[in-house]
Structure formats: structure tokens, C-alpha cells
Amino acid sequence: MNLLSFLEYDFMRNALLAVCIITPLFGLMGTMVVENKMAFFSDALGHSALTGIGIGVILGIGNVNLIMIVFAILFALLLNKIKQSRFVGTDTVISVFSSLSIALGLAILSQGGNFSRYSSVLVGDVLSITAQEIVNLAVIFGAILIFWLFCFNMLHAISINRSLAASYGVPVKWMENLFAAALAVIVMLSIRWVGILLINALLILPAAAARNISANMREYHFFSVLFSLFSGILGLVVSFYCNMATGPAIVIVAAVIFFCTFFYSKSHGS
């Protein structure tokens, strides 16, 4: 059996291109999510997609991506406000918002028994991506890279010590809000291809795996992007030949990599 036979199909070639664009973004952004202990934050952000879709349905807005992005940015800024306030039990409050957002979305979209029309967003379907959507993702990829090049040092300083970063003139709240907004855009644009139930795993697992074996920030980013890209490509290939959903296959590969790096780091005393 030819392992590259999947490339004979247009939808698989499109899916491969999409994976090669989406996964490095997750690898990059995931490092900062892990360093800032934002797993609850990004999970809540993913769940807000359902409410965004529901609001779009109520308002009769045809462009689902637009309403999802707008709602997610507002939702992210609200969550960031809670996080910045150092509210007692921040994780609990964010978890409440996460639960409420997915419940509202389900309540709205399930009216009249129509939720089956939107159930695909739960697990995603990267095989249905079109050439124009790939172009859109490529534009976002370029924009996020520019943002990362200009803002990474400030974001990294904030992740180490907010007060110290502020004393050196870093606009802490502005940078945290910019990062939250950028994360919201990436999550919302990827949600249809990755799925609400899996989006957070793809943000966390490659970065967490990279952290297990990295000695410095350069290695951290390199391994995170590498693991994310490898998980995406191998998961896509496995899903094709095993006739299973692509999103879960990618997450399973990423989880295997995490456990391998975890036990490797433990065995080598790092």
C-alpha cells in the first residue's frame, strides 16, 4: 500500500494544507497558553463558539465566522478582565462562564430539534475545507506571525512577572488583551475544522509536551511547533487509512507524544 496515496484526493490535499497552517499556530500560541496557565481560559473560549453561532441564528446573520469571531473577542476580553482582577477563585468563575456559554448555545441551537445541523462543530471536519478557506487561514497565519515577532518578548516578560514587566514599561493589560483577542480569532477560525471538544487539547498538548524536554525558550517553541505539526499530519494520515474522524486522531497522536516526552523527562531526571 502506498502511504502517499491519500494525496490523490483533492479534499485530502486541502486538508493537509490546512493542517500545515493551523497546527504551527496552535504550537506557537499554545506555549503562551501553557506558561500563563490559561487552559481554563482557552477551553471556555472554545465553548463560546456555540453561543456565538446561536446569536448569529437569532439575529439572522448568514456569516457564521464573523459573528463567532466578534462574540469570541468580546468573550475573551471579559474573561481576561476577570483574570486580571485576581478575583478569588478565578478558575471557578471562568469555568462557570464556560458552562453557561455552551449551555446557552445548545439551548438556542436545539430549538425545534435543529441541533443536528450544527453538531459537526463539536468534533470538526477538516476534510470539508475549501481552497478559499485555506487562503483565509494563510492570511491569519501571516498576521499572527507578525504579531508574535513584535509582541513575544513583552508577552514572555508578562508570563514571568506581571509587576516586573510593568515596571519596565510593558503595557501589561493591553498586551494580555491583544493576546486574548488573537487567541479568540485563531480558535474561532479553526473550530469548524478541529471541533469545540478538541480545540483546547490541540493548544495544550504540543506545548506541554515541548515543555517536558525543552532547556530554553527557543527549544520550547521549536518542539511545540514540531509536535503540533507532526500530530496534525500523522493524525490526518491515520484518520484516512483507519476511516476515523481527523480531529480525534490528531489529539490521540498529540497525547501519545506528551506521554512519551513526560516519561522521557522523568527517566532523565529533568
Image (spheres, rainbow, N blue to C red):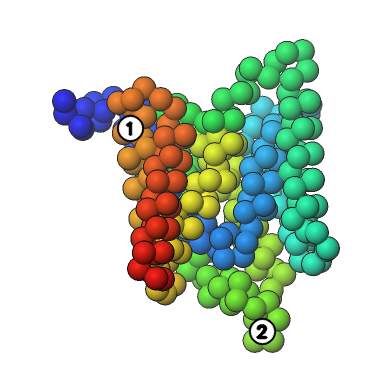
* Residue found at x 65% / y 86%: 168
The three-letter amino acid code for the residue at tag 2 is: Leu
Residue 119 location, x and y as percent?
Answer: 61, 23
**Mark 1 or 2, nearer chain start:** 2
Task: For the N terminus, give its image quadrant.
Answer: top left
Q: Give the label, 1 or 2, closer to the camera.
A: 1
| Residue 116 sits above or below residue 47 on the image | above
Q: Horizontally, is 128 left or right of 83 in the view?
A: left
Q: Horizontally, is 184 left or right of 85 in the view?
A: left
* Residue labelled with disc 2: 164
Q: Nearer the viewer, residue 258 or 268?
A: 268
Q: Quadrant of residue 78?
A: bottom right
Q: Quadrant of residue 106?
A: top right
* Residue found at x 78% / y 18%: 111
| Residue 132 sits above or below residue 256 on the image | above
Counting labels gives 2
Q: Quadrant of residue 231?
A: top left
* Residue labelled with disc 1: 238
- Label 2 sits on a secondary structure element that is helix
